Amino acid sequence: MLECSSYRARAANPLRMNPDLEKLVRLHHAEADLKRVEAELAEIPRKKSALEETLARDRSRLDAARAALDGSQKARKQHEAQVQDLEGKRSKYKGQLMDVKTNKEYTAMLHEIEGVEREIRLREDQILAEMERGEGLSAEVKAEEEAFKEAEGRSREGGRALDERARELEAERARVAAERDAVAATIAADPLELFQRVARLRGVAVAEARDGMCQVCHLKLRLQMYAEIKHNEEIQQCPACNRILYYVPPPAATAIEP
Ligand SMILES: [Zn+2]
């Protein structure tokens, strides 16, 4: 329920109010309720896109982990292909070793073969390193997949809760708007026109007078005026902000009768 609780609580103490003023105060509270409902409703799309942004960030973490694993696997395959090429080269050189004519050529060929074998060992080390890295990256992808699944669940649930809240608020808005229209329909033309004029100028047309002050603009009211406002018998406007002023007497239990 979105109601001005302090007003309602204190208003439980029956107000002896000018009927027009009493209706204007009710209209004021209905409008304030409506504004609150509409403001919360307007926040829902923003909250939903915040949920989507969070999920997109989680997804990009998963994508990055997958890309790193993919990169590692590709690098490993490249090293493996190079090892194959080098092994081919080594076989070819070993074949040629049979055909050399001189010692010098033989030594040179052995030297070539050693070079190729060094390169093979180097690539094999790289393959091992890439395999180790791949294991770590696979674990990371798995962890990110699980985290993303959870994040998706949370996001779905959050979205559902927001949709549910939006439905509640829409119903609330319809109810409060009907209440406001019903009150407005009972108000005579002049006070309603005054209310609308002040509302256009000031946003809020009605203000409570309490502790000798207009509670919206905080103007200190003259004693005589405050005393009159306390009777709620006439429609009076704040001399500074023009808002229609009303007074809520303290609860009966603590009220001291003059
Ligand atoms: Zn004022």
Image (cartoon, helix red, strand yellow):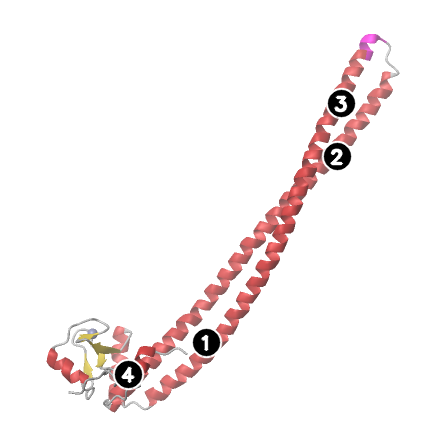
Q: Which residue is mark 3?
A: 116
Viewer-nearest residue: 170 or 138: 138
Q: Which quadrant would residue 194 be assigned to in this image? A: bottom left
Q: Which mark identifies residue 80?
A: 2
- The percent coordinates of residue 133 (x first, y second) are 66, 39
Secondary structure at badge 1 equals: helix
Q: In the image, which disc is placed on residue 169?
A: 1
Image point (69%, 40%), residue name: 74
Residue for point 70% across, 30% down: 125
| Amino acid type assigned to the residue bearing label 1 in the image | Leu
Q: Is residue 226 above or below residue 88?
A: below
Q: Amino acid at mark 2?
A: Glu
* Number of marks in picture: 4
Contact? badges 2 and 1 (CB < 8 Å): no
Q: Main secondary structure of the magenta part?
A: helix
- Crowding at dot 2, Cα within 10 Å, few <14 / some 14-19 / many 20+, comes out as some
